[in-house]
Image (tube, grey):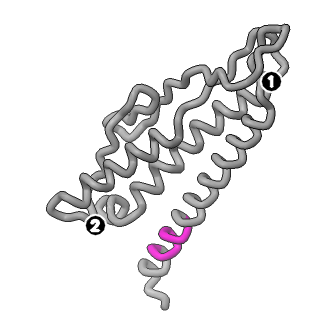
Amino acid sequence: MIADIFQSGSMPVLHKLVQFTEARQKLLNHDAANLTTPYFKPVDVDPKAFQKQLGEAIDRRRQSGNPASGPLDVRGSNQVRFDEQGGLTLKPTATNQGVLFHDQNNRDLERVMQNLAENQMAQRVALVLLSSRYGQLQTAISEKV
């Protein structure tokens, strides 16, 4: 019964989004930290592809017998994979968006900062919504109005 509570509504979607943004944040932080490292090539995963995967999983769940609950089957892509235990693996690729400098570094500070800001905002929204859901559960369990 408790497991059903955590597999219902928006909670599994928010968990997957938090997992993705956390893992992507590590990639983006690594890119920012190595912006001046010679021969460094920034890497990233496509957030739009993940959003599409997540949307397709939501659509599959809506078409099932009980659209409000049940597992969220997010199918993997070549960059984002979820295992049976719910773990996340990212396979980033080189972005090749910046200017190739004389030290063979392919950097674009503005793009890295934009990606960091967008990822942090997505993570923050997901965490606030998830925190709200947990607050509702805590209120229900404590039987307070």
**Residue at (19, 64) in percent of width and height:** 66
For label 2, the SS is loop
The amino acid beneath tag 2 is Ala
Q: Quadrant of the N terminus?
A: bottom left
Tell me if residue 96 comes above or below residue 13 in the rendering.
above
Residue 99 magenta-highlighted: no
Q: Which residues are magenta?
A: 131-137
**Is there a contact, CB below 8 Å, between mark 2 and mark 1?**
no
Please identify the quarter of the rendering in which residue 116 is found: top right
CA gap, disc 2 and disc 1: 44 Å
For label 1, the SS is loop
- Left or right of residue 1: residue 33: right
The amino acid beneath tag 1 is Leu
**Residue at (60, 53) in percent of width and height:** 122
The mark found on residue 35 in the picture is 1
- Left or right of residue 80: residue 8: left
Tell me if residue 58 comes above or below residue 78 in the rendering.
below
Q: Which residue is mark 2?
A: 68
| Nearer to us in this view, 11 or 3 | 11
- Type of secondary structure dominating the magenta stretch: helix
The mark found on residue 62 in the picture is none
Please identify the quarter of the rendering in which residue 7 is found: bottom left
Tell me if residue 84 comes above or below residue 64 in the rendering.
above
In the orientation shown, which residue stands out farthest toward the bottom?
A: 145
Graded by Cα atoms within 10 Å as few (under 14), some (14 to 19) or many (20 or more), the crowding at tag 1 reads some
